[in-house]
Amino acid sequence: MHQGEIGEDNVNWEAAGALGEIVSAIAVLATLLYLATQIRQAKEQTKQSNELSRFSAARDLHGQFNDLNRLIATDSSLRQVLVKPGELSAEEREQVYAYAMMFCNVWMSAQAAYDNGLTDESGYAAAAKDVRVELNRWPHFRAGVDEWLSNYPENSHMPIFQSVVAPHPKHQTEPPKWPTETNASTGSNRL
């Protein structure tokens, strides 16, 4: 073998090695570009999924409130009990309690949706305002909500119930007081 042939073999192997490194670098770059594209698409899909989740949560909450309002619109016996002045019978109190319990469950859903980022500040504020509005809407409703909170005191810490708990700090230790003929005739909804 001649000395020139050995040098040419070394050069060929060095060139092949350099070419292999270039091809490897291009492959790594292509892989990184592909991964970057996949990550960007995944982020976009996550964003769209989150938006859809928020929309679905808002729609579900509105549906729950609509169901409660539909019940008032279609159930005349419930409507009559809610606006009845004076004392309620045990059956009427149970009817108001059951209706208050439905509202409390919807309010808890609103709190959970807000806590988990499924509703925004304005959606939560509307639900919190609904608590205050509904408490003053019917003479016996607050007593039903107070009874529910005394039965489930672990829920009274939720911020959405603060308009209920704040004026009534003893609601967990004393049973709720349903309006009587005396305090219902004053027009006061507060106990």
Image (spheres, helix red, strand yellow):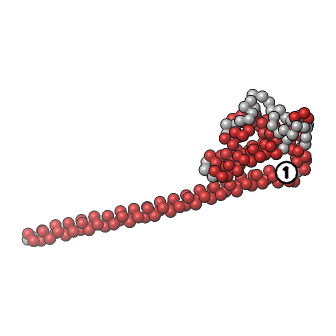
Q: Nearer the viewer, residue 142 or 111?
A: 142
Q: Is residue 102 visible?
A: no
Asked where in the image residue 66 lies, by quadrant, the reply is: bottom right
Q: Position of residue 46 (x, y in %)?
A: 55, 58
Residue receiving disc 1: 72
Quarter of the figure that contains the N terminus: bottom left
Above or below 86: residue 116: below
Q: Position of residue 91 (x, y in %)?
A: 89, 39
Q: Is residue 131 visible?
A: yes
Q: Nearer the viewer, residue 28 or 173?
A: 173
What is the residue that sits farthest to the left in this orientation? 2
What is the residue that sits farthest to the top in this orientation? 173
Label 1 element class: helix
Asked where in the image residue 145 lies, by quadrant, the reply is: top right
- Amino acid type indicated by mark 1: Ile
Report the residue at 62% width, 46% height from top. 115
Q: Nearer the viewer, residue 25 or 82?
A: 82
Q: Residues within 10 Å of mark 1 (few under 14, many from 20)?
A: some
Report the residue at 70% width, 56% height from top. 59
Q: Nearer the viewer, residue 125 or 78?
A: 125
Q: Is residue 114 left or right of residue 168?
A: left
Q: Position of residue 17 (x, y in %)?
A: 24, 65
Report the residue at 32% width, 64% height from top. 25
* Labels in figure, total: 1
Report the residue at 82% width, 45% height from top. 137
